Image (cartoon, rainbow, N blue to C red):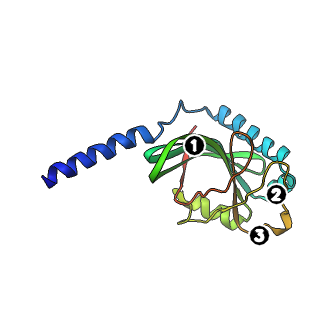
Amino acid sequence: MKILAASLFAAALAAAASFAVPPPAQAASGAELERDANDTLHSFVRQIGGARELANKAVGILVFPSVIKAGFGVGGEYGEGLLIVDQRPAGYYNMISASFGFQLGAQERSVIIMFMTQSALDAFYRRAGWKVGVDGSVTIITVGVGGSIDTDKVTEPVIGFILDQKGLMYNLTLEGTKISKIER
């Protein structure tokens, strides 16, 4: 009886996971990913005062234009992005995470991660799969549309911004998200 119950639980969990974790959409080409990342970054800079100055101070900027999060009990998140160093593409990456607990539905957001020091960027490069909260911390900065960033008060080595479809940033965490290099 215990084996049957465990088997049913495992089957239910697998079924929920298949609905909850969004399959990666048609993979974008490198050129499409670069265009979408640049559009996302330019939109961010237009909307938020101080964002351009902060981006100019960053030694590397990782931009995920579209991160899809979906769940039905078990959830998942996936997105592909571009690392920009010295205003040039420096590699393509994906971000993936899983979550458990009450959740239902799907949402899309954009994520921008800025490496403010060379040592933080070097630490990111050294990892085959960089996990937020384990291999490095990302301080999420929350600012509304029309707000501004005081660039003199940003002192963390790695900072992040999360934008929804309307351009508003909301306070979420990237803790547990794994970022890995991909080929395009």
Q: Which residue is mark 2?
A: 54
Q: Residue at x 73, y 65 (%)?
A: 117
Chain-order first, disc 3 or disc 2:
2
Q: Amino acid at mark 1?
A: Gly
Q: Report the label total.
A: 3
Viewer-closest of 93 and 149: 149
Q: Residue at x 71, y 64 (%)?
A: 118
Q: Are marks 1 and 2 in contact (CB under 8 Å)?
A: no
Q: Secondary structure at mark 1?
A: strand
Q: Secondary structure at mark 3?
A: loop
Q: Quadrant of the C terminus?
A: top right
Q: Which residue is mark 3?
A: 155
In whole angstroms, how far apart are the C-alphas of marks 1 and 2?
Answer: 24 Å
Q: Which residue is mark 1?
A: 79
Q: Amino acid at mark 3?
A: Thr
**Which quadrant of the structure image shows residue 27?**
top right
Q: Secondary structure at mark 2?
A: helix
